Amino acid sequence: MSDKVTLNSLRAMKQAGEKIACLTAYDASFAAQLDKAGVDVLLVGDSLGMVLHGEDSTLTVSLSDMIYHSRHVRRGAKRSLVMADMPFMSYANTAQAMGNAARLLSEGGAQVVKMEGGAWLAETVRELVARGIPVCAHLGVLPQSIHKLGGYHVQGRNQRIAEEMKKDAVVLQEAGAAMLVLECVTRSVAKEITQRLEIPVIGIGAGSDCDGQVLVLYDVLGISGRQPKYSRNFLASHATVQAAIEDYVQSVKAGRFPALEHGFD
Ligand code: KIV
């Protein structure tokens, strides 16, 4: 477990059927604990707007916020790969995305940037990847589009939207995305996308068939003031944060988490 996690090793894990354990992280101390516990990918999620800043959505998070937190997470990460969210409206067009993603890598120390959206992002993904910026795509519930979606509703139940999501996943992989996050997607659609793609697919509320899982750290520690159906408070049955995170990692790797009750049909 001592080798540094890279995009190549994540792809090899998918091919070998080894589950990928990811968690959000926002500072150096937690990053170091998560790294030590064996978390493969630390996501500096824009969920920090909600769990750190107390906002009711992720829309208020700025690029400076993301750079600030990424820099500290990177300091705590020895083995884990650090991925950072591109915040709301920081990638509305390719030129803007290029400059902002470059700052997340050069100033924030991120190794991958994540962007929410479907096929409309393909051109941007292609251009970023061509210039050496790895991209993780994000489909399903898109928290930055909360006002358009009208709520955090499970995606994939509607046949037309499910088909569009499957097509978007392929288009984004072909554009060069190195990973895909699926958020609150029905088990069957997530399974089909995971089987169809060569890149690792990481689920949150997307069932157990994805190549890996990600959760919001503060939900896992029971301090976010919410307990989404797809998550679990791992600290409730442990005395230390370290033991709780090790349990999360081992549960993901062994296929014990997520269980049936954490997914959606
Ligand atoms: O911001 C975040 O924490 C995320 C996860 C929910 C995937 O994007």
Image (tube, rainbow, N blue to C red):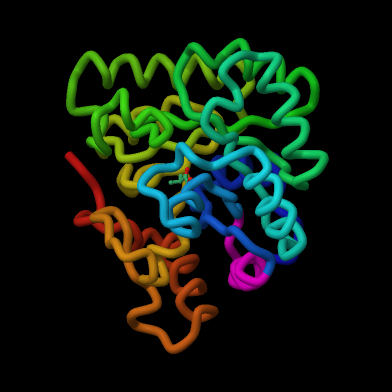
Q: In the picture provided, is 248 more to the left or to the right than 14?
A: left
How far across and how far down the image is residue 16, in percent? 56, 46
Tell me which residue sits at (47%, 32%) in the image.
138
Tell me which residue sits at (59%, 39%) in the image.
62
Foreground residue, 73 or 148? 148
Q: Quadrant of residue 97?
A: top right
Q: In the picture provided, is 21 more to the left or to the right than 209?
A: right
How far across and how far down the image is residue 34, in percent? 59, 67
- Chief SS of the magenta region: helix
How far across and how far down the image is residue 78, in percent? 76, 63
Q: Is residue 80 above or below residue 106?
A: below
**77 falls in the magenta region:** no
Q: Residue furthest bottom?
A: 239
Tell me which residue sits at (38%, 73%) in the image.
234
Q: Quadrant of residue 98?
A: top right
Q: Quadrant of residue 131?
A: top right
Q: Is residue 240 above or below residue 181?
A: below
Tell me which residue sits at (64%, 21%) in the image.
176
Foreground residue, 76 or 194? 76
Foreground residue, 59 or 95? 59
The magenta segment is 29-40
Quadrant in the picture for the N terminus: bottom right
How far across and how far down the image is residue 79, in percent? 72, 60
